[in-house]
């Protein structure tokens, strides 16, 4: 019997690569929890694509309620910091804590996240916040460095093959405007 793992999902392209890689080693349950995503229309688009991906792979999928105020509160006082810094750490902690809580509620022993596919995500910060969340809810955090072995490029290829939407900014309103500024200059 395969070990059970709740997999936190941030978007369909990262989900596709991670599920493709892990499905033979784990019994997976995908959990979409992203109060950071702005605006709501984008949230709904990413959620629907993530559901589509789970259906393609035949993996159970649930999503959390969309409460963007939770993200606003979590990054309060950190909005001046750059992507990749302390505001992202707070954002990881928010989403992984909730994933750990859901994992404990399901009675499953462990959880992980697909966020490490992105080259912009700090794996040390992900693992630190994942472990803190696990301790809080009495479950285990399984670290995956999915950007290794060319994971990001492979996730792009796989998402194209499966016809999945691929976003061009991380998710929050700050990253949305940071992306717009980068495009302009
Ligand atoms: S850039 Fe991404 S990880 Fe960082 S706070 Fe925004 S949504 Fe969260």
Image (cartoon, rainbow, N blue to C red):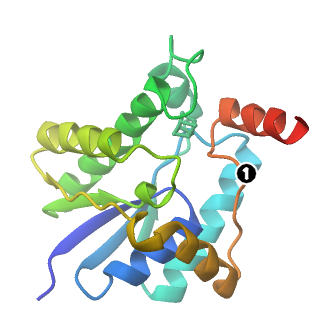
Question: Residue 100, position in %: x, y?
Answer: 25, 48
User: Would residue 181 be found to the left or right of residue 92 on screen?
Assistant: right
Q: Residue at x 42, y 83 (%)?
A: 20
Question: Residue 138, position in %: x, y?
Answer: 9, 46
Dot 1 falls on a residue whose secondary structure is: helix
Residue 35 versus residue 166: which sits nearer the camera?
166
Residue found farthest to the right: 184
Q: Is residue 120 above or below residue 73?
A: below
Q: Residue at x 30, y 42 (%)?
A: 124
Q: Can you identify the residue that label 1 sits on? A: 42
User: Would residue 176 be found to the left or right of residue 99 on screen?
Assistant: right
Local crowd size for mark 1, using a 10 Å CA cut-off: few (<14), some (14–19), many (≥20): few
In the rendered image, which quarter contains the N terminus?
bottom left
Quadrant containing ligand 1 reads top right
Q: Is residue 1 above or below residue 29?
A: below
Residue found farthest to the top: 77
| Residue 94, image quadrant | top left
Question: Residue 21, position in %: x, y?
Answer: 37, 81
Q: Residue at x 13, y 54 (%)?
A: 140
Q: How many marks?
A: 1
Question: Residue 16, position in %: x, y?
Answer: 51, 76
Mark 1 Cβ inside 8 Å of ligand 1: no
In the rendered image, which quarter contains the C terminus?
top right
């Amino acid at each position: 019997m395969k070990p059970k793992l709740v997999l936190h999902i941030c978007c369909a392209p990262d989900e596709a690569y991670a599920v493709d890689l892990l499905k033979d080693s784990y019994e997976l349950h995908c959990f979409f929890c992203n109060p950071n995503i702005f605006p709501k229309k984008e949230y709904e688009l990413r959620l629907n694509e993530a559901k589509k991906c789970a259906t393609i792979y035949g993996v159970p999928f649930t999503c959390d309620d969309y409460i963007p105020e939770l993200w606003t509160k979590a990054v309060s006082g950190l909005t001046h910091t750059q992507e990749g810094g302390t505001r992202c750490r707070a954002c990881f902690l928010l989403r992984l804590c909730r994933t750990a809580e859901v994992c404990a509620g399901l009675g499953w022993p462990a959880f992980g996240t697909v966020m490490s596919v992105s080259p912009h995500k700090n794996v040390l910060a992900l693992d630190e916040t994942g472990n803190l969340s696990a301790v809080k809810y009495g479950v285990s955090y399984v670290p995956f460095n999915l950007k290794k072995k060319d994971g990001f490029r492979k996730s792009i290829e796989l998402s194209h093959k499966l016809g999945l939407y691929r976003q061009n900014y991380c998710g929050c309103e700050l990253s949305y405007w940071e992306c717009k500024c980068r495009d302009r200059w």
